[in-house]
Amino acid sequence: MPSIVQNAQLEQCLREILAREGYAVSPVKQHGETGVDILATKDGESFHIEVIGFKSSPPARAKDFYESFFRAVSRLNDGANRCVIALPKRFEHGLPTRANQHRVAWKRIGEAIPELQIWLVDTEKRSCERTKWLYWLLA
């Protein structure tokens, strides 16, 4: 059974990584507050980050992913230089399949929204792998 990673656990880990790398990181949202999960800025570049945990249910994981996509790209309205979907590293096993399942649309989305990225956060190693949206078609 896949290990569960709560949204808050992933968000806290990513905040630590970004702070360690010298990013200015927005405060944690209060319960019920809307908006971007993490706003990280450095050297004039802003990363608007939507965080998703890893649930045991595959349909719930898919729903979370697709919802986060729309939340992430909506940050273009806020002047985002980079729109990021941050996922637990465990997601990397299913991303190539998901990208290839939606191959034509995935490619068009990546070409139309070059700001879109997927970051894989390893909460155990306290690390983050940053990829562009289109990377997953080649993986």
Image (cartoon, rainbow, N blue to C red):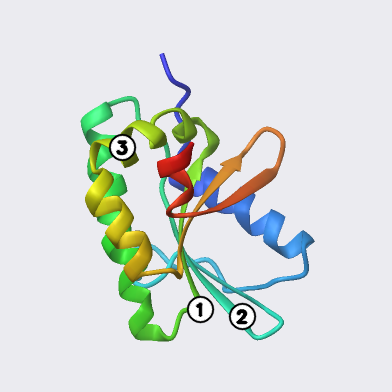
Residue at image mark 1? 81
Circle 1/circle 2 CB separation < 8 Å: yes
Q: Find the distance from the CA under tag 3 to the CA under tag 2.
A: 30 Å
Q: Nearer the viewer, residue 93 or 37?
A: 93
Q: Tell whether 59 sits left or right of 127.
A: left
Q: Find the distance from the CA under tag 3 to the CA under tag 1.
A: 26 Å
> Which of the two marks, 3 or 2, is nearer to us in this view?
3
Q: What type is the residue that disc 1 sits on?
A: Asn
Q: Which residue is located at x 48 percent, y 36 percent?
A: 139
Q: Find the distance from the CA under tag 1 to the CA under tag 2.
A: 6 Å
Residue at image mark 2? 45
Residue at image mark 3? 100
The residue positioned farthest toward the top in the image shown? 1
Relative vertical location of residue 13 with respect to residue 113 in this rendering, above or below: above
* First along the sequence among labels 1 and 2: 2
Q: Tell whether 46 sits left or right of 126.
A: left
User: Label 2 neighbourhood size at 10 Å, few (<14), some (14-19), many (20+)?
Assistant: few
Q: Which residue is located at x 48 percent, y 34 percent?
A: 92
Q: Nearer the viewer, residue 102 or 25?
A: 102
- The answer to whether any part of residue 32 appears in the image is no
User: Label 1 neighbourhood size at 10 Å, few (<14), some (14-19), many (20+)?
Assistant: some
Circle 3/circle 1 CB separation < 8 Å: no
Q: What type is the residue that disc 3 sits on?
A: Asn
Q: Position of residue 5 (x, y in %)?
A: 48, 34
Quadrant including the N terminus: top left
